[in-house]
Image (cartoon, rainbow, N blue to C red):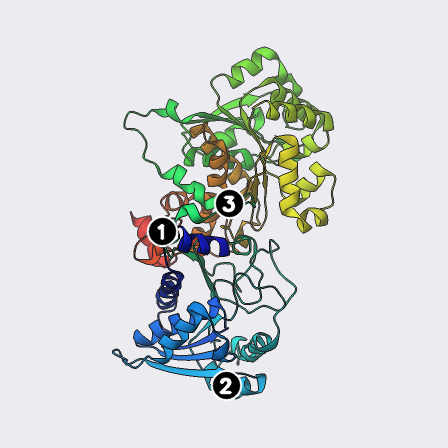
Amino acid sequence: MQACDRLTTERFAVPSLDLMRAASAAVAAFAQEQFPAARRVTVLCGRGNNGGDGLMAARLLALAGLEVTTLLLGSPDCLAGDAAEAWRELNSLKCEPKGGRSLVHVIESAEELARHTEALETDLILDAVVGTGFKPPLKGLALAALEWIKPATAPILASPVLVPPVLAPPILAIDLPSGWPADETAATVDDPVFPADAVITFTAPKPAHVFGHLTRHWEQPVVVAPIGSPDEAMLSTLGLHWAGSALSLTQARRPAAANKGSFGHVLVVGGTLGTGGGKSGAPALASISALRAGAGLVTAAVPAPALPLVAAIAPELMTWPLAATAEGSISAENLSPEFLATLTAGKTVLAIGPGLGQGAETAEFVAGVLLATKISAVLDADALNILAARPALLAKLSEMAKAGRTFVLTPHPGEMARLTGLTIAEVQANRLDVARNFAQQTGFTLVLKGARTLIAHSDGRVAVNTTGNPGLAKGGTGDLLTGMMAGLLAQHPEEQARAVEAAVYLHGLAADLAVIEADEHTLLATDSLRQLARAFRFQGFRFRADGPNRYLWLQGLPPAESSPAAACHEAAE
């Protein structure tokens, strides 16, 4: 970001003070939009540029008619450059056209800070202590400020019957929650950091914004605001990007002359049904989600005993009965060249694994069909476990991938551990490197599921997904993702990397939209499926000149999307 700001000023002639003014304007606008009931605001400012953003935002909020108390942590004599100008402008504020008020205090010791407890009786706290460029840990006045706010930001639980709880003032972090290093790729950090209920950063996300659990709750917003830096000034060598940037792929209008053959034919293979039970719902969910994602045609190939159940899921779905073992799983009888040729004729994408089982004949069939076909393939669930148990098959498919065939593997951490020979703890401790190295070594596209799902490509690029919620920790959601990936791959054979990223982003976004009406405890995969239309139309990934979508929403939903009323309006339409 330092290089980006420098290039913006030196090469593109945008003064650095203008960047600070744009950042502070974005903060003030977001604070009022996200916390409209807040009338009293306390702004904690450090002495760097992050503090300068806070000083300018404090001035704008006072001019907007709010009661603003600003605490500068340290002597103003140490302010320099744009931050010094922000200090002068705040202190020269005389006009209060809307009845606002600005109180400014210089804090030079922890003891002095402790005397300003009235500043904690507020509706909103702005954290502008330190931002990008900070090296942990917090110390001095910054650490004292963290200790100072703790009592005010912990909810006080009152009587469970007679008295409602006292709500703590929310905290809006400017750039990052103070103390959180911008380059951190872990979900949490050990050093002390400020709590946050919303985060607004500028120009582009930093690693911490896409990997870190920066806010107290998963649904709270983390947004990026444009402040005038041109795209040409944004350079990164990290090989990381945001999965949501691929969503534009799904929002292009279809040609007027399109037909079902224009959008591919997905073959879903999976399912079991026998006297010991079965898993017919898994291939059914994958198939219907492939249709919902826009595939022109979808055929579900399942063991013959399971076919009536799968066929009943939707009249638009085509089915194909496969010879079954006595246990009701897919038999190796289906491997005859003539049958495979008929089964796969005209298919453009294979999705294999949902509800499959791992019996000997089924494993033989999986190996045979993967080696006998050349179409793109999405492997999930038991197909991954079969692959992990057969290193020779894994090596052969890797050779095919390096020769140009697309394989998308979608493991959760346990399946990833089996594929790599690592422990689950080792996978989780180093998710980024594990995913990237596996994709580069094998040639596969790897979707490592979990909080902040990673999409690793064979060229070393990794996309980080920021949608989704704990409600997805339930059976069926992985099958939904498998079908969505297959459906988008079928439609976009020339942009398969972006198709996989868009599917992962949409899958999580649909779940985020679904919990508005439901709850993260009660969420079902079919609830997410019903929100796919809203997810496809989502505009929060694009910068807008005005309105709530003037920000890029990495996490959370714009106000227009996040209310039950909005969901009901969509349903009515």
Q: Is residue 554 visible?
A: no
Q: Position of residue 450 (x, y in %)?
A: 59, 48
- Identify the residue at the far front of this view: 10
Q: Foreground: 507 or 211? A: 211
Q: Foreground: 305 or 147? A: 147
Q: Residues within 10 Å of mark 3 (few under 14, many from 20)?
A: some
Q: Give the vertical position of 488 relative to 556 (above or below).
A: above
Q: Position of residue 414 (x, y in %)?
A: 68, 44
**Label 1: which residue?**
543
Front: mark 2 or 3: 3
Q: Are marks 1 and 3 in contact (CB under 8 Å)?
A: no
Question: What is the spatial separation of the Cα atoms under label 2 and label 3, in whole angstroms?
Answer: 42 Å
Residue in the image at 46% along x and 64% along y: 198
Residue in the image at 61% along x and 70% along y: 138
Q: Give the vertical position of 79 relative to 452 (above or below).
A: below
- Give the residue type at disc 2: Thr
Answer with mark 1 or mark 3, whichever residue precedes in sequence.
3
Q: Secondary structure at mark 1?
A: loop
Answer with mark 2 or mark 1, whichever residue precedes in sequence.
2
Q: Give the vertical position of 197 relative to 305 (above or below).
A: below
Q: Residues within 10 Å of mark 1 (few under 14, many from 20)?
A: some
Q: Residues within 10 Å of mark 2 (few under 14, many from 20)?
A: few
Residue in the image at 33% along x and 49% along y: 571
Q: Are marks 2 and 3 in contact (CB under 8 Å)?
A: no
Q: Secondary structure at mark 2?
A: helix
Q: Secondary structure at mark 3?
A: strand
Residue 241's disc number: 3
**Label 2: which residue?**
117
Answer with mark 2 or mark 3, whichever residue precedes in sequence.
2
